[in-house]
Image (spheres, rainbow, N blue to C red):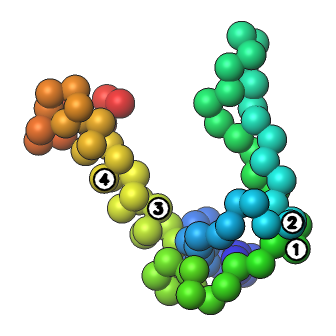
Amino acid sequence: MCEPDLLEYRGLSYFILDMKQPGVTVQPLRQMNGYASFNQVFLTDAKVEPEFLVSEVGNGWAVTTTTLMHERRRRATQLGDPLGQAGSCL
């Protein structure tokens, strides 16, 4: 969900959906060597049930930054930096 009248990231919502449902198309973004680390995901009439909304409508950026913070801390810990000081370098 996106509210176009709001600026920047305000108005984004964070949700979970079944990636195998009709209306979800996943296309790998291939590098020159053929390896694909990331995908493009297209949603065309895919369904997101209300119970799969994470947090409130319009609060998606806060959920995203929290998710990324935890991922950064996990990677820093794997690199032997339990305080996550190297996190900003990852």
What residue sits 79% from the left and 66% below the top? 21
Q: Amino acid at mark 1?
A: Asp
Q: CA distance from mark 2 to mark 1?
A: 5 Å
Mark 1 or mark 4, earlier in chain:
1
Mark earlier in primary sequence (3, 2):
2
Residue identifier under label 2: 23
Q: Amino acid at mark 3?
A: Thr
Q: Residue at x 81, y 72 (%)?
A: 46
Element at label 3? helix
- Mark 4 vs mark 2: in front: 2
Instruction: Name the residue located 46 percent from the left edge and 62 percent from the top edge.
Output: 64
> In this image, 80 relative to 47: left or right?
left
Going from the N terminus, do you reach mark 3 or mark 1 first? 1
| Label annotation for residue 45 | 1
Q: Does residue 49 appear anywhere in the picture?
A: yes
Question: Tag 3: Cα neighbours inside 10 Å, few (<14), some, or many (≥20)?
Answer: few
Residue that badge 4 annotates: 70
* Residue 89 location (% of width, % of height): 31, 29
Does the residue at mark 2 contact the one at mark 1 (Cβ under 8 Å)? yes
For disc 3, the marked residue is: 64
Q: Amino acid at mark 4?
A: His
Which quarter of the rendered picture does the N terminus lie within? bottom right
